[in-house]
Amino acid sequence: MRTTQFKVLEEVSLNNPIFIEALPGIGHVGKLAIDHVIDELDATKFVEIYSPYFPPQVLVGEGGIIEDMKNEMYYLKSAGADERDFIFLVGNCQGLSTEGQYELCGSVLDFVESLGAKELYTLGGLATGQPIEGVEGRVLGAATDEASIEMLKEADIEIRSADGGIVGASGLFLGLARLRGMAGFCLMGKTPGYFIDAEAAEAILQKLAILVKLEVSTEELEAKAEEIREMISQAQQMEQEMLSRAMGQQAPQQAQDDLRYIG
Amino acid sequence: MRTTQFKVLEEVSLNNPIFIEALPGIGHVGKLAIDHVIDELDATKFVEIYSPYFPPQVLVGEGGIIEDMKNEMYYLKSAGADERDFIFLVGNCQGLSTEGQYELCGSVLDFVESLGAKELYTLGGLATGQPIEGVEGRVLGAATDEASIEMLKEADIEIRSADGGIVGASGLFLGLARLRGMAGFCLMGKTPGYFIDAEAAEAILQKLAILVKLEVSTEELEAKAEEIREMISQAQQMEQEMLSRAMGQQAPQQAQDDLRYIG
Amino acid sequence: MRTTQFKVLEEVSLNNPIFIEALPGIGHVGKLAIDHVIDELDATKFVEIYSPYFPPQVLVGEGGIIEDMKNEMYYLKSAGADERDFIFLVGNCQGLSTEGQYELCGSVLDFVESLGAKELYTLGGLATGQPIEGVEGRVLGAATDEASIEMLKEADIEIRSADGGIVGASGLFLGLARLRGMAGFCLMGKTPGYFIDAEAAEAILQKLAILVKLEVSTEELEAKAEEIREMISQAQQMEQEMLSRAMGQQAPQQAQDDLRYIG
Amino acid sequence: MRTTQFKVLEEVSLNNPIFIEALPGIGHVGKLAIDHVIDELDATKFVEIYSPYFPPQVLVGEGGIIEDMKNEMYYLKSAGADERDFIFLVGNCQGLSTEGQYELCGSVLDFVESLGAKELYTLGGLATGQPIEGVEGRVLGAATDEASIEMLKEADIEIRSADGGIVGASGLFLGLARLRGMAGFCLMGKTPGYFIDAEAAEAILQKLAILVKLEVSTEELEAKAEEIREMISQAQQMEQEMLSRAMGQQAPQQAQDDLRYIG
């Protein structure tokens, strides 16, 4: 594989769809929220994306079946109070390199624009490094333009102003989208940042429900977060190995030796 | 976006313009100086540059409006005592990779040469790691050729000799420009290196005024520096998050877990 | 060299060959196992692979003869109880960059598919960080599909489930192979991870013997491991140098100085 | 500049020239030796090499004149006892990235092969991390083939056997050259590794004199080393700055702040 590949599973025709990005990031806030939406509202997967910019590895899934590093798109038709169409971008990774991020975000925007998308939401976590309680006041917003900021304010979303950056896909999608004349919103859920944060995901979903009229029960959210946490805890003991491999396919103690191995 | 893009906002015809580079660097010395010149002399923005070599992120600006990572060019016509034309290169970032730096600097030189530029100034800070007082004796110079060095000496600028390197755009522009037969000057303002240094910027501007006859009041410089400092201070608490994201889209505590997350 | 090069030493015609990957990794488990199989069963080298994604260096072999960084393919015809054909991929390194790993694994799959391969095994170590005794219960398996998992279970191989990733060539080959419709198995030998582990290699070979009916004596395995260990121990004293060079062609103490060297 | 550029200053016709590589590395051993040979024997510069794989910076030379990052080739005609032709490769840097190293070494080999070169010597330092006295027994050799090893032994050069790697241009040139059917030798001068080592350079030159019959007085070598050391010592105080810049164009204290700067 030498270029990013879009494997289109179903040709769909959508009407002015809203594009929502929720790739993995801090506290899994965006990913958790939209994985949940996809389950609850039974969205349909229609695209798989593979890329040489994704980590060169696979994951070991349930029952030992390997899982590729990939991004996926799901759609929903006539959903929510406004009967809008939706495209969701989820996955188990983001692009690794700077150029890879640009290439991937650009390719995805090409694709969703071809399906008629004119506005997008990017969802993510905002690490505070400190414990936070409850779902109230946990969402900060930013947007591509003044009118969009007004919409966030109407939804009672606190605006993050003149304050740092939005790094990775959640930021880059907004920037590249605006250059194409699309309107973009970023919802950031405050999270301590060091665990899978169901409350931040719930807070994000409450605000998204107001903005795009897409309501889902959030009861199952904590269960889903717990499920992920268990999976991660099982995996803990092999962490060191994975990191080592990633750093040159070897355990740290071997890394130097191997450099001089006569194969 | 797969290649660097020059978005030309206005087609301009310039007469033998002086090209001045002031991208962000140590102590924000060059950037602060030229952002100020642009404001004071009301230079006109005519080019925006976007690139897959810029950091894959956006910044959150005033009122929550996102700001793309970009470089910009401004022009001034018949300015200063000699009624020269000027092109200024400013921005919120430099290219991230080695090849990206070469591609970006080369592309900019192609562009400014096409507008008739034959000489350039690059501005930057020179970190001393120690407190420095006042604006006197704070500027060091280097250049592409002997004649240019003489001009720096005539402006009473101390020459930095046989001493280290000029890293990043300020250095690379000089090197690539000379290969094209352009004359280039580098003005470096000594700065402790750990804060936004208005005095070093003022020192640079005083010398630039002598060299290119472009005088500006520097009264507002300290206010501008203060403004930036406040913005940065507000942002401090989220620093950790941004760095974490940049290092793999995750908080450090999550980074290992996420590697094994089953999406 | 600007692209990956396959130097084909012999044109071979194979019948539905099994492809086995055993590039260097944790504890040298896979490499040690298959280097041994190649010796014992006298497999024939028929391809050498050179790539700009391999480390920019050479190794110093026996008698001072340099050894290129390379991957190699060997074949065996009508081998084992089922008289199957085999292709083995071994070498002294893996690709260094993300994109390089994708390019290399993709190119190798193109090649082995053109020779009729429809199934593959990837072999590696799984670092536990703790001492492990004996060869029993040391092999974990994962696979591309349910039917393959069943075959692993029939061979009494413990399945690694919902647990982390398989990083590097051993993982990526599985992922890319499945996208092409090939069936793939990964055998991971548990190893402390910090020495050349003959027992883990033996454990892998015992399971492989059941799966692909390719039996080899493992008596020589410990001797081979010892041989590698000695070679590495001789080399120990120059480790620091190699690492330094890799980090910019200089010893650490010189790295900063050299940056400013006037050549 | 988007590709490596060979600026040919003089078209030369050479007869079966010996190609000698001496780019900067540990202890500056190779570079110091050949810079000295070039001066002493008055070799003629005929090629300059510029590349986007070189560090994106310039150096500040004598009198403030900037110096590009570059490699250079010099030639000598009918030199030494055997009246052989020579090509020397020197410079102030090596390529930064893996792919860059391959591209550069490959391009140089294309060039010297086109001039008739069939054999090459690569010179470097071998860091021991410990003080070494005198010039005796300081040179280790490796080569591309058995016959070349014999030549090294005849010159009383200790062979480095089954022991680690030769990292960077000195190693890669040998590997790539052998793939083209060229014979290659590597001479490594043992050096503590943390200063400019004139004795190791002298040791290298003594052995080179035997091998290629190119004798030079080494009296000036220590003076040349001293000269470089002084230059470096003057530069010491700005080291921190350069490193910081290289790591993102900012002083370390500023790096985090700047990421969030609103430009």
Image (cartoon, coloured by chain):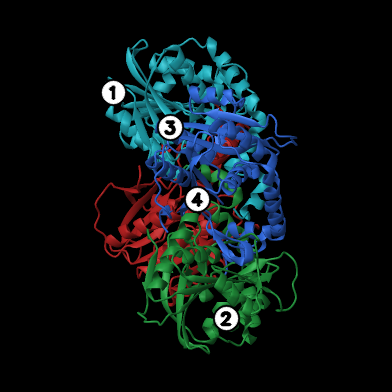
Chain colours: A green, B blue, C red, D cyan
Q: CA distance from mark 4 to mark 3?
A: 24 Å
The residues bearing labels 3 and 1 have C-alpha atoms spaced at a distance of 26 Å
Foreground disc of the pair 2, 3: 3
| Residue C194 drawn at (x, y percent) | 60, 51
- The structure residue drawn at horizontal position 49% and vertical position 20%, both measured from the top left corner, is D33
Name the chain letter of the residue that bears numbered label 3.
Answer: B
Q: Which residue is mark 4?
A: B44
- Asked if residue B81 is positioned above or below residue C69 in the image, the reply reads above
Write the residue at 61% across / 48% down: A253
Q: Amino acid at mark 1?
A: Glu
**Of residues D161 and B193, the one drawn nearer to the viewer in this rendering:** B193
Secondary structure of the residue carrying numbered label 2: helix
Q: Amino acid at mark 3?
A: Met
Callout 4: SS? strand
Q: Which numbered mark, 4 or 1, is in the foreground of this view?
A: 4
Q: Which mark is residue B182?
A: 3
Looking at the rendered image, the disc whose residue lies closer to the viewer, 2 or 1, is 2
In space, the residues marked 2 and 1 are separated at their CA atoms by 70 Å
Same subunit: marks 3 and 1: no
Is residue B216 visible to us here?
yes
Q: Residues within 10 Å of mark 4 (few under 14, many from 20)?
A: some
In the rendered structure, which amino acid carries the disc numbered 4?
Answer: Thr
The residue that mark 2 highlights is A211
Question: Do marks 2 and 3 both belong to one polypeptide chain?
Answer: no
Which residue has dot 1 on it? D11
